[in-house]
Image: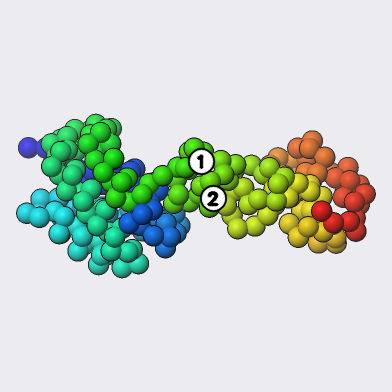
């Protein structure tokens, strides 16, 4: 008899938890965004322990609450309800089918209810849900987004880059062109690819970038 593959089940469940709100609060968002691997491990372990339990919801609820005490009770309840849905609708598919088939079954049968419970949304349609999107009302703001020169933290890293400020000479993001920016440029002098101090846009950090920076030295953005 083929063995049950809890990893396929758990990975399918986690694929649906890309963004949580409503029952999952802002601290849950931070946990899932920054410590996703830890949550993955806990869900895997609890999925394995509770998959054949007589009351999966109660088992999973208690298991996740113990394994991830930082997670709010409301958010835990959404995971627990999801596990029951998967057991009721996708047991055979996830036990004996492929991971892709398991994921498709979970998505088709359990995703909507889970999203309603957790509050998974992408209000601005930028492809990033509210877990890691620091401004879900602006489609130009999401993790990894390019700068728009509008003074916004487009990439959600907590700092404003030169691209985000619209000031290419300000290499350290303090809105001033000073010795600090010169030092940043010198630390990358000779860079040949993916150069953050490439002021003139030629893909390199050379003397021309130094001259461009010195041309704006002492000004602000």
Which residue: 24% across, 57% down? 77
Q: Residues within 10 Å of mark 1 (few under 14, many from 20)?
A: some
Which residue: 36% across, 49% down? 119
Q: Does 133 sit above or below residue 27? A: above
Q: Is residue 141 left or right of residue 99?
A: right
Which percent across, then down, holds residue 169?
Answer: 82, 50
Q: CA distance from mark 1 to mark 2?
A: 9 Å
Q: Mark 1 — residue?
A: 124
Earlier residue among tags 1 and 2:
1
**Local SS, label 1:** loop
Query: Can residue 49 be seen from the camera position used here?
Result: no
Which quadrant is the N terminus positioned in? top left
Which percent across, then down, holds residue 113?
Answer: 26, 43
Count of numbered circles in the view: 2
Q: Residues within 10 Å of mark 2 (few under 14, many from 20)?
A: some
Which residue: 51% across, 41% down? 124
**Local SS, label 2:** loop
Q: Is residue 58 left or right of residue 68?
A: left
Which residue: 53% across, 52% down? 134
**Disc assigned to residue 214:** none
Query: Can residue 164 be seen from the camera position used here?
Result: yes
Q: Are marks 1 and 2 in contact (CB under 8 Å)?
A: yes
Colour mapping used in the image = rainbow
Which percent across, then down, holds residue 32?
Answer: 40, 55
Q: Mark 2 — residue?
A: 135
Which percent across, then down, holds residue 139?
Answer: 56, 40
Q: Does 99 sit above or below residue 30? A: above
Q: Does 17 sit above or below residue 90? A: below
């Amino acid at each position: 008899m083929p063995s049950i593959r809890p990893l396929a089940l758990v990975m399918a469940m986690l694929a649906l938890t890309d963004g949580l709100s409503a029952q999952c609060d802002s601290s849950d968002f931070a946990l899932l965004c920054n410590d996703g691997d830890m949550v993955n491990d806990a869900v895997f372990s609890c999925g394995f322990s509770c998959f054949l339990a007589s009351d999966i919801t109660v088992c999973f609820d208690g298991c996740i609450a113990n394994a991830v005490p930082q997670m709010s009770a409301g958010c835990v309840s959404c995971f627990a309800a999801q596990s029951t849905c998967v057991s009721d609708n996708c047991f055979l598919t996830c036990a004996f089918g492929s991971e892709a088939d398991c994921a498709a079954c979970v998505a088709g049968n359990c995703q909507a209810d889970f999203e309603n419970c957790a509050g998974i949304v992408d209000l601005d349609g930028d492809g990033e849900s509210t877990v890691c999107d620091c401004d879900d009302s602006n489609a130009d703001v999401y993790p990894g987004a390019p700068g728009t020169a509008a003074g916004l933290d487009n990439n959600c890293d907590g700092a404003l880059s030169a691209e985000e400020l619209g000031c290419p000479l300000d290499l350290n993001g303090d809105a001033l062109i000073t010795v600090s920016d010169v030092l940043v440029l010198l630390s990358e002098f000779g860079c040949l690819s993916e150069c953050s101090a490439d002021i003139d846009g030629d893909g390199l950090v050379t003397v021309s970038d130094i001259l461009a920076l010195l041309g704006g030295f002492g000004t602000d953005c």
